[in-house]
Image (tube, rainbow, N blue to C red):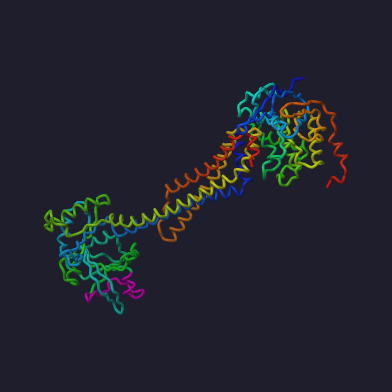
Amino acid sequence: MNIGNLLKIAYSSIMRNKTRTLLTILGVVIGISSVIAMVSLGQSSQKNINNQVSTMGTNMIMVMRADQHKGGVNMGSDNTQTLTVSDAEAIRSRCKYVSMVSPMVSASGQTVHGNNNSVGSIQGGSPDILTIRKYELSEGSMFTDEDVTKNAKVCVIGKTVVDNLFTDGEDPLGKTIRFKQIPLKVIGILESKGQNQMGQDQDDIIIAPYTTVQKRILAQTYLQMIFASATSEADADAATEEITQVLRENHKLSDSQDNDFDVRTQAEMLKMMNSISGYLTYLLAAIASISLIVGGIGIMNIMYVTVTERTKEIGLRMAIGAHSRDILLQFLIESAILSLIGGLIGIILGLGISYAGSTLLNWPFVVSIPAIAASFVVCAATGIFFGWYPAKKAASLDPITALHYE
Amino acid sequence: MTAIIKIEDLKRDFQVGTETVHALRGVSFEIQPHEFVAIMGTSGSGKSTMLNILGCLDKPSAGHYYIDGIDMSQCSKDELSTIRNHKIGFVFQSYNLLPRTTAIEQVELPLLYNNAVSAKERLERAEHALEQVGMENRRNHTPNQMSGGQQQRIAIARALVNDPVILLADEATGNLDTRTSYEIMSLFQKLNEEGKTIGFVTHEPDIATFTKRVVMLRDGHVVKDYPVDTKSAQAALESLPASDDY
């Protein structure tokens, strides 16, 4: 059998049965596009979370005070005073997997400038804090180590603070704002970062030297947190290990004592976030596989229902000289063409839906190759199998039996 | 002159449940080139079984069947397909045209299963076959746009297109009214005059009078085999009363 003739036969058969063709293609399209759209959107949301966590900092490691327990009661961490500047210094000097360190103290209260005021918090850090937490300056400059030494009354502020305290068109640089009556000169303005994944405004921030916040505002010697940055993402665990070691030594903890601090990496936060969105992706994939099954049953039905008409056709074709092999090839080609067309449309539609969805939600657009491959294979296999199987049954009949099939 | 079809002591049994039905119980006859043979008989006489075997759609249980000297009873399923494609033209009672397919495509169909025929030759031969049955003006019509007689003509063209050794018709006029039947018979007579060998199964004695020879079957045996004083279908058509033409 000449392949050109077979293609011609398959083509005219497809064109002759437009409704069946369209319905079969539709089944494939629905199955494939829903799987691709759902899985891609699930992965988009995951990617979105990843991106947002990584905007929080560069290979960031947070050292926090541990909760205190008194008589079996968890007292929280607010009264823990074990974390000090000397710990930060020790981490800076002794940990080789740590590239940057910043102590962290924060106070909340009212900020005033002219007639405007707002309530928020002030964060005290070292100049490294900007890099560790991935902030960038849009104007002005960051305070220096010298400012830290001198407890200088300077600060850098985020965009929300600028909007709250300054009237339109007023240049905040060089102006003085008051936090809890302490005057601080604005020397830099931060680039906007928007909200984080918890909905917190990352631009509502005032950063001053930690010494200034400790001595002038809080009058305390301990720290609330230490931010550090690992030398690379891969070194984060090693850095965590090192920090734990250094702090235990610094705090003179014996082997039997628990840590009086907590070390957390960005990767751990990411894991926590991902476990939530991971479930979402599984859920979406489960819904999508149902659409895949529904699409498959659709294809199966169409192929099976047309078997009566087609059995007669097969009988006739065999009566005028087609071999069983010709019949099988014809049906295989037909269903392969339908699956292929449906598959391509489904892939395009699925990608279109996920593109539209991710654009609408402001998520990154992710193309899931495994989802495309898996859904395509399932639909194509269903289409081809249920195109081929009734044909095989019919082609094995005697031409006479097939011709008289009702 | 050598016979193009020769059957010897042909038997065909069917197993229906536990009983064996003997449809053909040892039939022998020959068909010479340019013959126009009616195979007649009542229901259950074995004439359809006979025709299916002649058309290589079925195989005998015993006996021999030769087309052009080749023994069909030794052929495989695929070989029979090829024989059907190259040597046999089959016309069915219910036309068996493909739905939603144009006349020219219906006629081209057998040639699509023949690798030796190029696309150009296929089209030429299909057009020629349509001319032979007087349907060249209907080449792009689909079956639902044609009358029964026209559909049967397309089916005949499809049977002619591979230039078969023998044209076999199974009650080809069974679904048609008298006038259209006569028209179809007239077409068969014309084709026979042009040199086609025709085997025609019918149970209507009236139709058989348009052939040249009758082979009468009863209970799986040939009971009569006699030449016919052929009537002209064209003349019969002209003698039909006008009132029949409704």
Image-based side of A246 in relation to A24, left or right: left
Q: x, y (%) of residue A253?
A: 12, 57
What span is in magenta? A160-182
Depicted A205 relative to depicted A319: above or below? below
Residue at the farthest front position: B18
Depicted A134 relative to depicted B18: above or below? below
Q: x, y (%) of residue A271?
A: 30, 54
Residue at the farthest top position: B1
Splitting the image into 4 quarters, where does residue B154 fall? top right
Q: Residue at x 29, y 57 (%)?
A: A269
A365 inside magenta stretch: no
Splitting the image into 4 quarters, where does residue A190 fall? bottom left
Between B162 and A99, which is closer to the camera in this rendering?
B162
Q: Residue at x 39, y 53 (%)?
A: A282
Residue at the farthest bottom position: A115
Quadrant containing the C terminus of chain A is top right
Splitting the image into 4 quarters, where does residue A333 fall? top right
Between A84 and B190, which is closer to the camera in this rendering?
B190
Between A148 and B137, which is closer to the camera in this rendering?
B137
Q: Residue at x 75, y 29 (%)?
A: B217
Image-based side of B73 in relation to B145, left or right: left
Quadrant containing the N terminus of chain A is top right
Q: Is residue A39 visible?
A: no
